[in-house]
Image (cartoon, rainbow, N blue to C red):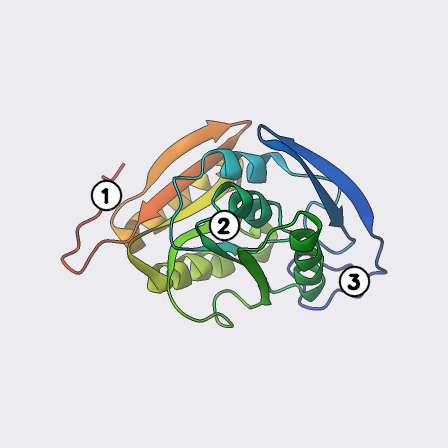
């Protein structure tokens, strides 16, 4: 049975390739590997997630980082932040760690973690390109873990296609956070952002 990109320990033969990603600030050089999500290049959903990211501060999590484009690029753009790249897939984490070094990123680190279970502390921003093939139960579980581990006023940004369940995902985020807003669209992808309220339940986002 073939590996999925959310397989903890891929058994497929490693097949490393080098790719480049052009961004307004310049070119990034990455390595990708078999058994890792979007190994042929930066997928349009992740690109939209990067382009629509809010102003970042504090501690940032690239949840389900794959080979690391979201975390690497946002870490370079926001050198004042401390970025964590995590994935359940050990090969993905090893690849992302190499890509941090390859691009000279010093304000980020990688960790193997099933969701947020292997991570410590709170985060001010969490970005997620959810593993659609893992199923709704897994994805909504990640939403709940993210909510629990965000600091007051922190936000979760997800990217999801309309035909992959954007409407139902937005409803689930609204249930968890009390707010959910589609902040960007492009190529069939939606970026949905929710903000964790403070102790009094207040949030910077209005419900949609």
CA gap, disc 1 and disc 3: 45 Å
Q: Position of residue 181 (x, y in %)?
A: 33, 38
Local SS, label 3 = loop
Label 2 belongs to which residue? 128
- Residue at the image point whose x is 48% and y is 60% from the top: 137
- Residue at the image point whose x is 37% and y is 64% from the top: 122
Q: Quadrant of the C terminus?
A: top left
Label 3 belongs to which residue? 1
Is residue 49 shown left or right of residue 203? right
3 or 49: nearer the viewer: 49
**Within 10 Å of the Cα at label 1, are there few (<14), some (14-19), or many (20+) other Cα atoms?**
some
Is residue 180 shown left or right of residue 106? left
Is residue 1 shown left or right of residue 25? right
Label 1 vs 2, first from the N-terminus: 2
CA gap, disc 3 and disc 2: 26 Å
Residue 149 can be seen, yes or no? yes
Label 1 belongs to which residue? 204
């Amino acid at each position: 049975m073939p590996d999925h990109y959310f397989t903890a320990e891929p058994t497929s033969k490693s097949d490393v390739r080098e790719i480049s990603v052009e961004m307004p600030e310049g070119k990034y050089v990455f390595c990708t590997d078999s058994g890792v999500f979007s190994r042929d290049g930066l997928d349009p959903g992740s690109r939209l997630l990067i382009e629509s990211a809010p102003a970042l501060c504090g501690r940032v999590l690239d949840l389900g980082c794959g080979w690391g484009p979201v975390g690497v690029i946002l870490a370079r753009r926001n050198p004042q932040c401390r970025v964590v790249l995590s994935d359940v897939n050990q090969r993905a984490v090893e690849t992302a760690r190499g890509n941090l070094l390859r691009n000279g990123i010093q304000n980020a680190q990688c960790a193997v973690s099933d969701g947020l279970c292997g991570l410590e502390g709170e985060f001010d921003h969490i970005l997620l390109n959810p593993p659609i093939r893992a199923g709704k139960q897994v994805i909504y579980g990640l939403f709940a873990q993210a909510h629990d581990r965000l600091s007051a006023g922190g936000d979760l940004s997800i990217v999801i296609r309309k035909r992959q369940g954007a409407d139902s995902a937005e409803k689930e985020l609204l249930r968890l956070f009390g707010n959910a807003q589609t902040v960007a669209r492009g190529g069939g992808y939606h970026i949905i952002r929710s903000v964790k309220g403070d102790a009094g339940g207040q949030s910077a986002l209005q419900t949609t």
